[in-house]
Every structure is written in structure tokens, then in C-alpha cells.
Image (tube, rainbow, N blue to C red):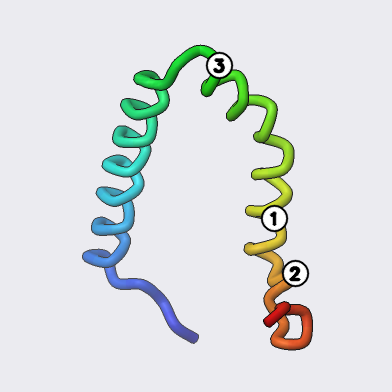
Amino acid sequence: MLTASKEALHLLERYDRASTAALTRVVEELSDADRAALHEALPALDRLVTALETGDGTRPDSISP
């Protein structure tokens, strides 16, 4: 069994906070049209994240050259 150290968990938490703040700041600077396009893309992005988390599409035989 592999477990993360307290320091590793702390670093991950700091990274999550910093990356969320950076993403929020950049999205707020986008045009209304770009923010609307991102909003429309959220379902597809959610499916992408789910596929990455579950390993779908990551088998060597499913990757196109």
C-alpha cells in the first residue's frame, strides 16, 4: 500500500489552491463569447476528465498513431 506523506498532501493542497486561483483569474479575463464557449464545452470536458480518471481510451491499442 502506498500512501502520501503529510508534506506531499500539503503540497498538493497548495497546488490545487494556486491552480484554481490562476484558472479563475484567467477565465475572468476572457471575453463573454469565450466564457460562453467554455460553458458550452463543459459537458465534453467533464466526459474527458471521467475518461482520464477511469482509464478509458488510455490502452495502447486504442491510441491512434
Q: Residue at (71%, 61%) from the top-left corner?
A: 51
Mark toward the viewer: 2 or 3: 3
Is the residue marked by circle 2 packed among few (<14), some (14-19), or many (20+) residues within 10 Å?
few
* Residue 12 sits above or below residue 4 on the image: above
How many numbered circles are shown? 3
Q: Position of residue 33 (x, y in %)?
A: 55, 16
Amino acid carrying mark 2 in the image: Asp
Amino acid carrying mark 3 in the image: Ala
Q: Position of residue 37 (x, y in %)?
A: 61, 25
Please state if 5 lies on the left or on the right of 57 as rendered.
left
* Residue 31 sits above or below residue 52 on the image: above
Secondary structure at badge 1 equals helix
Q: Are marks 1 and 2 in contact (CB under 8 Å)?
A: yes
- Direction top: furthest residue: 32
Pointer 1 or 2: first along the chain: 1
Is the residue marked by circle 1 packed among few (<14), some (14-19), or many (20+) residues within 10 Å?
few
* Residue 40 sits above or below residue 53 on the image: above
Which residue is the site of mark 1? 50
Q: Quadrant of residue 31?
A: top left
Q: Quadrant of residue 3?
A: bottom left
